[in-house]
Image: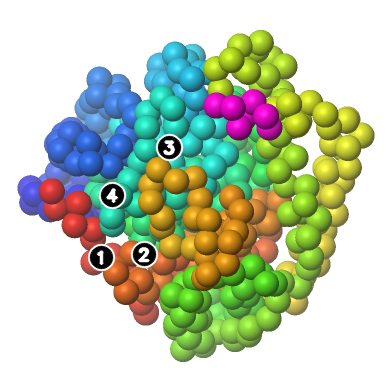
Amino acid sequence: MTPDFYRLSVRELGRHLREGQLSARSLLDHYLERIERINPTLNAFIALDVMGATRAADDADSRLRKGQARSPLDGIPVAIKDNILVKGQPAVWGTRFMEDNIATHDELPITLLREAGAVLIGKTNVPEFTLRGYTGNPVFGVTGNPWDPERTPGGSSGGSVAAVAAGLVPLSLGTDGGGSIRRPAGYAGLVGLKPTLSRIPRADGLPQVLYDCEIVGPIGRTTDDVRLMMASIARPDRRDQRSRGFTPILALGSDPGRRRILFVEQFGSAPVDPEITASCRQAADVLRALGHEVIKGPLPFSIDRLIAEWAKVGNIGLSLLAQRDARFYDLVSPAFADQARAGNEISGGAFLGIIEMLFAFRSEVGKAFGEIDLIMTPTAAANPWPKAEAFPPVIDGKEVGPRGHAVFTNWVNACGHPGIALPAEQTRDGMPIGFQLVGDFGADELLLDIAEQYEAASPWAARWPAVANL
């Protein structure tokens, strides 16, 4: 057993497990040792389930010895973002309001991971209520980026991407409510998929403070790693009615053919770091060289009203939490108390108007994808900033607000379409830069096929941050 097997892909690890060259128990022990050694530098994990993971690994070994692997994930360690419920594990959501909360049941994606044989190793850090674009909270502190531990990995899946990028775990399951998988994946040099709404079925979780815009999705080092998680858990399930219209994801890709890609490198006058623009242009050139038609232009639909109304969705969600528990205002950070109070002032009619706006937006985006196959943008407008700061106040010399860095992503959540983050060329000082491809509703496999094609032409798997070698 090589001491560097954490560098292997999920498919390679699975082959070693099935062929008996590696046991699930020894694989788990290897990652636990790495977590003990490296996690103090990053603060990616906030809780480990050593006993539960050991039982799961032993069960996987028993199946694998009999040639009865359940899925490509059987015996593979997986980290879980803290806002996803895992029975018997903390579900703190980054807030003192839930500091002592232990989940009493698994939510649906966790049930599916267990059925697939995955070894659930622990929970990863998040910002409070997963509503900020960096990862830090009053309970567990701040998470660092493996490429520079003094900078942020973004949010809200910052702990998840830090764990994968540092080689503490091969895969993580995160959530994306406004770019919370895609932006951190871009900041960490990883692949992160926000699937189509309900492509991974979801039920029995925490309250949906972002209506139905928050999706669970995989984070991995390679496109194939992400594909294998999708092949294992993205399937119809009666507990999520909308999932029943989808077919399972295939574990092997296919030729995507020649596609028409709209490259939107800037949203109006919103500033973008010049290094990000240059890097994404290089990625667009790679896609052109692969035979795709890549055209530059603006978004073919307006997101102005969405941007104007977006904060209200989270405010209403926090208002619901406050109505359910009188301790809310005493225990949460003041900014979230203020948001809940703002949510209290939104009438039922106004909320219905927001829902109608989302439905109209989804219709408009659906029509636009009748003319194009993919939309390409940067994952973020700014490169990683100091980890304790909530957002970068200046981008390309212009002052911006809390979502100035996050302008490219939340429209994808609002319309329910799939989006995948992929690594582009790094900054001059070696920090990752990402771009996203957004597909038509249900076009998750096309995104994976294009991503694999791009990865073969512009590979990144050999890039590792220095912290991985500690």
Distance from label 4 to label 3 (Cα)?
Answer: 13 Å
Of callouts 1 and 4, the N-terminal one:
4
Asked if the residue under mark 1 is in contact with the one under mark 3, i.e. CB atoms within 8 Å, the reply is no
- Please name which of the two marks, 2 or 4, marks the residue nearer to the observer: 4
Q: Is residue 336 magenta?
A: yes
Main SS of residues in magenta: helix
Residue 224, quarter of picture? bottom left
Q: Identify the secondary structure beneath mark 1.
A: loop
Of callouts 2 and 4, the N-terminal one:
4
Asked if the residue under mark 3 is in contact with the one under mark 2, i.e. CB atoms within 8 Å, the reply is no
Q: Which mark is residue 149?
A: 4
- From the viewer's side, name the closer residue of 214 and 99: 99
Asked if the residue under mark 2 is in contact with the one under mark 1, i.e. CB atoms within 8 Å, the reply is yes
Q: Which residue is rendered at x = 59% and y = 75% of the image?
A: 265
- Residue neighbourhood size for the residue with mark 1, other residues' Cα within 10 Å, grouped as few (<14), some (14–19), many (≥20): few
Q: Identify the secondary structure beneath mark 4.
A: loop
Q: Which residue is rendered at x = 76% and y = 73% of the image?
A: 300
Residue 130: percent from left, percent from top = 53, 37
Distance from label 1 to label 4 (Cα)?
Answer: 16 Å
Stretch of the chain drawn in magenta? 333-339
Provide the residue designation for mark 1. Answer: 463
Provide the residue designation for mark 2. Answer: 432
- Please name which of the two marks, 1 or 2, marks the residue nearer to the observer: 2
Provide the residue designation for mark 3. Answer: 136
Of callouts 2 and 3, the N-terminal one:
3
- Amino acid type for the residue under numbered disc 4: Pro
- Please name which of the two marks, 3 or 1, marks the residue nearer to the observer: 3
Q: Is residue 357 left or right of residue 176?
A: right
Q: Is residue 4 left or right of residue 357?
A: left
